[in-house]
Amino acid sequence: MTRLIDGRAIAADVRARVAEAVGALSDRDIAPGLATVLVGDDPASRVYVRNKIRACAEVGIRSIEHALDADISEADLLDLVGRLNADPEVDGILVQLPLPACIDAARATEAIDPRKDVDGFHTTNAGRLSVGLDAMVPCTPAGCMILLKSVCPDPTGMRAIVVGRSNIVGKPVAQLLLAANCTVTIAHSRTADLDARCREADIVIAAVGKPEMIEGGWIGPGATVIDVGINRVEGADGKGRLVGDVEFETAKEVAGAITPVPGGVGPMTIACLLRNTAIAACRRRGMAVPDSVRLA
Ligand code: GUN
């Protein structure tokens, strides 16, 4: 029987644990704060930031909102980030991407104090993750690992394939799998015999951003499939619908466990952002991170 991995329920559990940790901090008069920086008026980014602010409120994290005009200069944005770095009321800083073309996103990301980098995008955090030091772990990869461990608590020795090599998902999730003692293959658009490489894997992490590219026939019997893709396609009825990078209907017939889209990895990203903010609030004050919000 294939197990459906319920990302909504698992994300709700993560959020409840964060709320508990934030409650313990508030007993010590500490109110964790997340600064959100939204540049311009991209409708999708507005929705994402609004959802993040709402989720913060639900677990007791303060939001410090900054909405900037699309024509703000890079220097002014970097100046704001510098002030947020120095602000003791701010535990986490999130600069929503994408940024307008006139701003170098890498420079903006690098300007964030790594200790406040709740996205885990700063090269200091990427480097620390790769050498096994405490790091702010990017939210979607952290979410993938929590989902994986919900069905496979110890993946030691398993063969994992990550399809996609982005800095935000593919590379960090590969590092996390390696840290969990998996044998990891990072595949991408130039990988030869991708279907055969996938079929050999005990764990498939699909993060290519191509709707239903990974077919059921590419999945080995009993494998665990974590689908990071969120793609809008037109359904047979002409209406839009969301699909992952994996062809769910065929893959679920062979997989041992699989995440649906929607309702799989998606809800984990914001839950892990809240978790990172609570972790940042603890670490910045030299406090131990509560067990309840440690990575599963
Ligand atoms: N844009 C889309 N997803 C994200 C994210 O997780 N973090 C940031 N900062 N921007 C995004």
Image: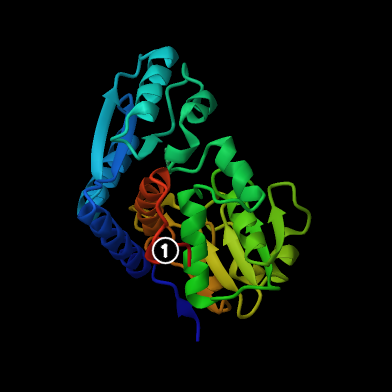
**Residue 151 or 293: which is nearer the viewer?**
293
> Residue 36: horizontal and vertical position, in percent?
32, 35
Q: Residues within 10 Å of mark 1 (few under 14, many from 20)?
A: many
Q: Residue at x 77, y 59 (%)?
A: 193
* Residue 47 visible, this orientation: yes
Please, is residue 150 above or below residue 233 in the view? below
User: Residue 266 is drawn in which quadrant?
Assistant: bottom left
Q: Residue at x 39, y 19 (%)?
A: 77
Q: Is residue 67 left or right of residue 264?
A: left
User: Residue 196 is drawn in which quadrant?
Assistant: bottom right
**Residue 215 or 283: which is nearer the viewer?**
283
**Secondary structure at numbered mark 1:** loop
**Residue 169 or 278: which is nearer the viewer?**
278
Task: State which image quarter holds ligand 1.
Answer: top left
> Residue 40: horizontal and vertical position, in percent?
32, 24
Q: Amino acid at mark 1?
A: Gly
Please, is residue 284 above or below residue 220 in the view? above
> Residue 137: horizontal and vertical position, in percent?
51, 50
Q: Residue at x 39, y 34 (%)?
A: 96
The residue where tag 1 is placed is: 264
Q: Is residue 154 left or right of residue 96?
A: right
* Residue 236 visible, this orientation: no
Indicate the colouring scheme.
Answer: rainbow
- Disc 1 C-beta below 8 A from ligand 1: no
Q: Residue at x 37, y 27 (%)?
A: 86
